[in-house]
Amino acid sequence: MAHARRSFGRILGRMLWHRWRDESDTHKAIPPQLVDRLMHRVAASEHRHSGQIRIYVEAGLPMSYLWRDAGPRERAVAMFSKLRVWDTELNNGVLIYLLLAENAIEIVADRGLSSRVARDEWQAIVASMGSAFRDRRFEDGLTQALEEVSALLVKHFPLRAGQTITNELPDQPVLG
């Protein structure tokens, strides 16, 4: 019984922490000028490879996730689908997901890229971003993640001389 109370207390505390966060927290962390800079960085990156990159930042998880005690990874995978990152011609889309309430970072890559990149490489990128986010240096962390994801896409899906691609997904980060 004591374990059930602790679990319920942990879930309730997590709910309150996430619900305390709102869009204003997201906009403080990622102001409009940063959204513009990140959008330009995504666009510049996509001129070097055939992949598509999306950035999604939200303050807290929706209540439906909190009731189920679902984590950031589950939400990132759902947003990967909702934003149609999986729907690129070469199956090489990548979502960089940041959950402010938990300083959680997730990278979800489509099967075309994830089959070529080892899990520990993804984990290393996330780990390197972690200190920047803990220090609230969101631009540094997102820029670093974008550069490292771009390097993987250039390595595995480089543009060939004279090759042009269609921009299949918006470059602007999404703030939730």
Image (spheres, rainbow, N blue to C red):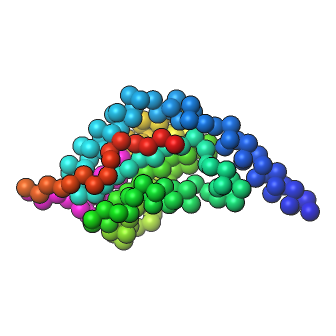
Q: Which residue sits at x=53%, y=35%?
A: 26
Quarter of the figure with the N terminus: bottom right
Question: Foreground residue, 118 or 89?
Answer: 89
Q: Residue at x 52, y 29 (%)?
A: 28
- Which quadrant of the view contains residue 139? top left
Left or right of 81? Residue 71 is: right
Residue furthest right in the image: 1
Position of residue 143 relative to residue 46, above or below, is above
Image quarter of residue 153 = bottom left
Which residue is drawn at the image coordinates 66% and 55% (left, top)?
64
Q: In front here: 115 or 175?
A: 175
* Residue segment shown in magenta: 146-161
Residue that extends furthest to the bottom in the rendered view of this protein: 115
Q: Is residue 97 above or below residue 120?
A: above
**Residue at 20% across, 51% down:** 48
Tell me, yes or no, whether the highlighted magenta stretch contains residue 151: yes
